[in-house]
Image: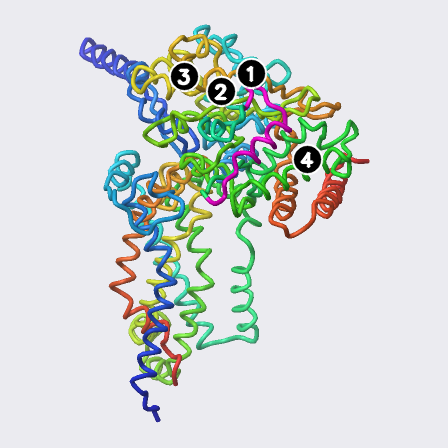
Amino acid sequence: MKMTQRALLGATVSLALCGAAMAETTITVATVNNGDMVRMQGLMDDFYAKHPDIKVEWVTLEENVLRQNVTTDIATGGGQYDVITIGTYEVPIWGKQGWLESLNDLPADYDVDDLLPAIRGGLTVDGNLYASPFYGESSFVNYRKDLAEKAGITISDAPTWDEIKAAAAAMTDTEAGIYGICLRGKAGWGENMAFLTTMANSYGARWFDENWVPQFDQPEWKAVMTDYVELLTKYGPPGASNNGYNENLTLSLQGKCAMRMDATVSAGALTDPAQSEFADKVGFALAPDAGLGKRANWLWAWSLAIPASSDAKEASKTFINWATNKDYLALVASKEGWRNAPPGTRTSLYANAEYAALPFAKMTIDSINAADPTNPTVKPVPYVGVQFVAIPEFAGLATSVGEIFSAALAGQKTVDEALAEAQALSVSEMTAAGYIK
Amino acid sequence: MARATSPRRKALTTLAAWSVALVIFFPVLWMILTSFKTEPSAVAMPPQLFTADWTLENYAEVWQRSDYPRFFWNSVVLSLGSTLLGLAVAIPAAWAMAFVPGKRTKDLLMWMLSTKMMPAVAVMIPLYLVFLKLKLIDTHIGLVLALMLMNLPIIVWMLYTYFKEIPSEILEAARMDGAGVFKEIAYVLTPMALPGIASTLLLNVILAWNEAFWTIILTTTKAAPLSAFIASFSAPQGLFYAKLSAASTMAIAPILILGWFSQKQLVRGLTFGAVK
């Protein structure tokens, strides 16, 4: 009897231990719907083969909805998500708030030193890496080489704004439906204001001075807005104030933009013959400068982070290590070619001969390296961020300013009126937020 | 006395009605057509209503990438659950307001309606915190409650309007025959107001099915309905319009079919009591 009881007890304990060992941890990953993220979801078999004890559930949302949901969850300590996809704007703010788990203790094979310094710098707060970049981007100029040749001009690898203006004028052929330049005009802090802020950086303008006083009443901003409105009014597509990333990319894929300044991440689509019949005619150049030492290119990364409220931090770190490791880039390359490897995160990717041979690789890495989020402007500023100001108030303020500037582009107000309105609004907001005493 | 309508006038009225219907339906038609296009055709400039390269690939990819049956089931549970629970609460409430009104009944009705005028985002954080505390986030019961509370003013108002059309003498007669409140509502009032109750049910199922604020905020994976399914294909930075259209078509198809088959009932209920 005693023997039977012992045997049963032993069997029960063994089963329980087995069960514990086999226990599956489920992590919920909140992400955006873009090509690279969709591709990762398709490659999950590799993750499950390596980590059968972790189950991943996806919540895929549109960027703004994701931002709203994740912000609500993280600010209230909801713990609904274990891994979140966040941008370079949120990381320094949320990291400082203590809302994110530090990723300093990822395994050695993660090779943190392989991360591109500019990208790593944007995701680090007080020496703590709070997010791991999944893909990074800057902005550059893409143009149709055949149209430049036809117009008898050459666009240098590192152009100035004067060169860009002259090229836009020379290549515009509205009768043939060719527009000299396509720039973001749609209102939004991530749309027209992302572009205008980088343009301002190169013109010597800045959002705020060292005392957080808005600077839209300064001559540098007047020069930025005058040139921006003139460029798009004279050489841009009709309805430019409604065009954002998608619209301008579509026009470029159809060959209707002779020149465009936008995200480096679109280079893959622009050089893909399946998506554009002008794929072999695309040239790239760095974002222009005005001779003041700063180029008009931004820096952005979609990164994976772990909310401090997650109750599956170890499993989440395992997932992040898999998704943002060098091995993942090689996995994508082996399945879908190097062109589709998530760009802009690791030095080793650009040292790879096959990747470096792609027409956009060098210009992408040069653009990323040219951006400095901790020193983004010609004059000193009290903030970090290239195309944004890393303060919580920025998204709302910049969207409002973006609406004013979009109206100026649409001809509903003059440049002077728009700048005066932007200045008054910014002063009011910054005073209310306590930045201006 | 009905006025005689000339054939010309009738033709003009018909033409106007079709034109308005086409304008209203056009975005849906555009979405359905886009769902059968390739991604490049979907974003072609200038836009093309028809294309040469029709495809079913978007549907195949959407089906393969998402667990559509789970989202669909959640939509059914949430829309039906919230509507039935809403009716269970609203029928007695509307009965009381219609047949035993108090001095402040009109004010109460107006206050209920006024809660609908408040932007949902104003109560987002408080409601989220309440749900968090009660562990109701991403649960069916939580969402059923949220949707029920959201639509309750409309349900009560609609039922109140229908009940007011029923002569109170009939209910009094039932009471004289010894019927209690429950029997009066269940066996006399409800059968008489059935067209109104049916249209209220249908309209609220549609409202709950299409709700896309709370259902996205308060769910992650387990209770997420088709609104979250659509949101997962929405991307401002990427050309996924064709797939987004396919996902949207799959999400609205069930409710579109339900609306089509029940339109007679819906119109009858919505115009109930409109002409005396």
Front label number (3 vs 2)? 3
Label disc, if present, on residue A32 of the rendered structure: none
The amino acid on which the numbered mark 3 sits, given as a three-letter code, is Leu
Number of callouts in the render?
4
Q: How crowded is mark 1: few (under 14 residues within 10 Å), some or many (20 or more)?
A: many
For image coordinates 78% across by 34% down, the residue present is A213
Query: Does the CB distance between marks 3 and 2 fall below 8 Å?
Result: no
Label 1 to label 3: alpha-carbon separation: 24 Å
Circle 3 residue? A358
Q: Nearer the viewer, mark 4 or mark 2?
A: 4
The one of B180 and B43 positioned closer to us in this rendering: B43
- Tag 4: amino acid: Val
Q: Mark 1 points at which residue?
A: A120
User: Do we see residue B40 in this rendering?
Assistant: yes
Q: Please tell me which of labels 3 and 2 falls first in the chain.
A: 2
> Disc 3 and disc 2: Cα gap in Å?
21 Å
Q: Which of A20 and A247 is in front in this view?
A: A247
Q: Mark 4 points at which residue?
A: A224
Please say if A148 is above or below B178: above
Q: Please state, as top left, top right, bottom left or bottom right, where the N terminus of chain B lies in the image.
A: bottom left
Which amino acid, by three-letter code, is at mark 2? Pro
Disc 4 and disc 1 on one polypeptide chain: yes
**Left of A34 or right of it: where is A186?**
right
